[in-house]
Image (cartoon, rainbow, N blue to C red):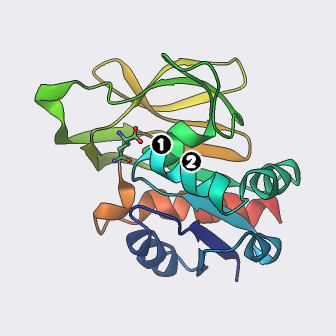
Amino acid sequence: MVKIGVLGLQGAVREHVTSLEASGAEAVIVKRSEQLEELDGLIIPGGESTTMRRLIDKYDFMQPLRDFASEGKPMFGTCAGLILLAKNIVGYDAPHLGLMDITVERNAFGRQKESFEAELMITGVAEDFVGVFIRAPYIVEVGEDVEVLSKHHERIVAARQGQYLGCAFHPELTDDYRFAQYFVNMVKESK
Ligand code: GLN
């Protein structure tokens, strides 16, 4: 069984654990960077990217997360996690982890749409996946190695680049585990 961590510094952590377990993986809440060594893959959850970044620095996670990535291990960023993975963030000089060749814009759906649900077609995952968007970012631009997996009204809301998977919504907040299953399969294939 693959062992997948959920970065447990802040945000929607437990729900990802439930989704991973329902998808046939062993799930671990990661609170110390040494825990990364025993994992096959990692989810960076939704929450608040600025807060999560502060905690990543405070608990010395930055280099260990970059090392984890350079070993080729799969990483899945959801919502704030997507922002943490991105190489470019609109309006910011520097990224956080800067691993995935995408440009994201924070809180990009605007005030009126702070929170909403939308049925999405996600390539390789589902034709009718309900995406829960909460002060969500979206992907403004992707590099040439990035596969766009889903769009909502012409805005890119899910993408994959090799070992990296990201989405603007919160798949863990529904009991539809097909997106979690897709990531678990990515992790299995990477072993
Ligand atoms: N707006 C948040 C941020 O910029 C992300 C929101 C979320 O993860 N639900 O980090």
Left or right of 100 in this view: 178: left
Task: Name the disc covering residue 53, or none.
Answer: 2
Count of picture labels: 2
Q: Position of residue 59 (x, y in %)?
A: 67, 63
Q: 99 left or right of 141?
A: right
Q: Is residue 70 visible?
A: yes
Category of crowding for the residue at label 1, using alpha-carbon neighbours closer than 10 angstroms: few (below 14), some (14–19), many (at least 20): few
Residue 76 percent across, percent down from the top left: 59, 52
Residue 21 higher or lower than 50, as above or below: below
Q: The residue under label 1 is which amino acid type?
A: Thr
Residue 177 vertical placement versus 101 (above, below): below
User: Quadrant of residue 13 in the image?
Assistant: bottom left
The part of the image, by quadrant, that contains residue 117 is top left
**Where residue 122 appears, x then y in whole percent?**
42, 41
Determine the image quadrant of residue 1. bottom right
Q: In the rendering, at what x and y percent does residue 150 appear?
A: 43, 33
Q: Residue at x 52, y 41 (%)?
A: 82
Q: Observer-nearest residue: 59 or 5? A: 59
Ligand 1 picture quarter: top left
Q: CA distance from mark 1 to mark 2?
A: 5 Å
Q: Residue at x 46, y 50 (%)?
A: 51
Q: Nearer the viewer, residue 162 or 139?
A: 139
SS class of the residue under badge 1? helix
Q: SS class of the residue under badge 2?
A: helix
Left or right relative to 188: residue 131: left
Tell me what residue is drawn at x 18 percent, y 41 percent: 115
Q: Is mark 1 within 8 Å of ligand 1?
A: yes
Circles 1 and 2: CB distance less than 8 Å?
yes
- 184 or 67: nearer the viewer: 67
Q: Which residue type carries mark 2?
A: Arg
Q: Which mark is residue 50?
A: 1
Mark on residue 88? none
